[in-house]
Image (cartoon, rainbow, N blue to C red):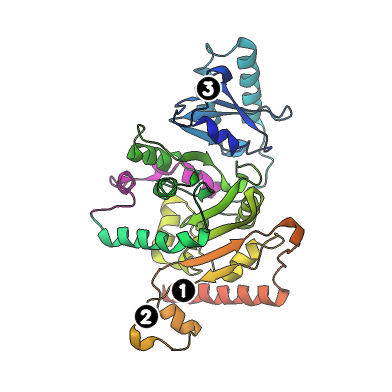
Amino acid sequence: MKYSLLNYICCPTCSGDLTFIIPPPGEVTQDDASEIENGLLACNARACSRWFPIRNLIPELLPDHLRNWEKDLEFLKTWEQTLPASIFKELWEQSQSFANRPVSVQDHGSNYKKSEISIKSRVTEADFFGPGFSSPFNPGNPEYTMHLIRRLGNVLPLLELKRGDVVLDMGAGYAWTTEWLMKMGMVAIGVDICRTYLDIGVRRMGKTLPLPYLVIGDIENLPIKNNRLDAVLCYDAFHHIPDRKKAMGRFHRALKDRGNIVLAEPGGMHEFARVSTEVMDKYGILEKGMELDDINGYCEGLNVLPPEQHFVLKIQGHEVGQTLSREFVYAHPYVDCNIFVVKKQADTQGLILQAPSFKKKIKTKIKRLLKRVFFKLVG
């Protein structure tokens, strides 16, 4: 972890500033090129007193109910001889208190999140993680490689980034998108809830090379400070988030005025596809697509412009000039995902996105119910 990451991250529980305990503050270099492989971060807020591990260059900034406290206490124990006795005792006792405290937060999607965190224990296929070591390139499947790059190439302009802008790569996975954003000159922060994927990303990039900022965190408890981001990229990842309205609110908080959220995600029928149901059954991971009406709902009450859906079409010369009906658009996709853009407005403009009308909500629910029934009948 680079020292400069402290400019952007915060405690996931109270949003307090973080500081290094290990290495001691006096020994931490502020040089951007140096990486801290293992250590401890602590929240500066007196009422919080939480600490967080840095393992394999990556800080783990998860809320209490998603932490593996047994593993974290083992990690803390390794620093017993390094820390002053009084500080170690305080951290140890507080950690045990947090570990044994009943879960008070309402997190209805915690089962999905814990499945993602423990994905390694659920995988039986020997080559499941293989593509991560060369992502996005997959010599065994060049068509999929081209698909990934084409999709990214089409959504990048919508982020409206310039050199030095700070961009959150949400659900970074193997972090190849984070790496590419960094190499384009952006300050890229890749956040994922699963260490397995990020560790593979670090191995692929190599510790001798400059690494982008990587953080293990829960998007619904986003450990990013207020007004730090110029843009958020959701690249085939937002459809795994259980509470999307809460996540969108966290993006809004961390974004600067006029910052963009760009989503490249599967459509509303995604959850009914056989491959999706198989993944949910086997790995316990949420697979739920989205349409523009859904995005409007996630943004309800936020200071944003009405969300946009963008289409990239593949048409032949003789089709130029035809009416762009909904049927025509959906029959000529060049990028096989839904692309959405949400722009945060300046607070002074007071443009709060209104909730969809009751009639529209009922209409959307009926449409989804009919689709679900149809897919069950034909499936």
**Residue 66 visible:** yes
Judge by depth and name the residue closer to the eye, 292 or 334.
334
Give neighbour class at mark 2: few <14, some 14-19, many 20+ (Cα, 10 Å): some
Callout 2: helix, strand or loop?
Answer: loop
Vertical side of 270 occupied by 378: above or below: below
How far apart marks 1 and 3 lie (CA) works out to 57 Å
Mark 1: amino acid: Phe
Mark 1 touches mark 3? (CB < 8 Å): no
Helix, strand or loop for disc 3: loop
Query: Distance of mark 2 from mark 1, alpha carbons?
Result: 29 Å
In front of the other: 274 or 35: 35
Q: What element carries label 1?
A: helix
For discs 1 and 3, the disc positioned in front in the rendered view: 3
Q: What stretch is highlighted in magenta?
A: 111-139
Question: How many marks overall?
Answer: 3
**Are there few (<14), some (14-19), or many (20+) residues within 10 Å of tag 1?**
few
How packed is label 3: few (under 14 Cα within 10 Å), some, or many (20 or more)?
Answer: some
Residue pictured at 40% horizontal, 36% vertical: 210
> Is residue 115 located in the magenta-colored stretch of the structure?
yes
Q: Residue at x 28, y 47 (%)?
A: 127
- Residue 28's label in the rendered image is 3
User: Looking at the rendering, in which quadrant would you find the C terminus?
Assistant: bottom left
Q: Tell me residue 99's x, y (percent).
A: 61, 30
* Amino acid carrying mark 2 in the image: Ile
Comes first in the chain, label 1 or label 3: 3
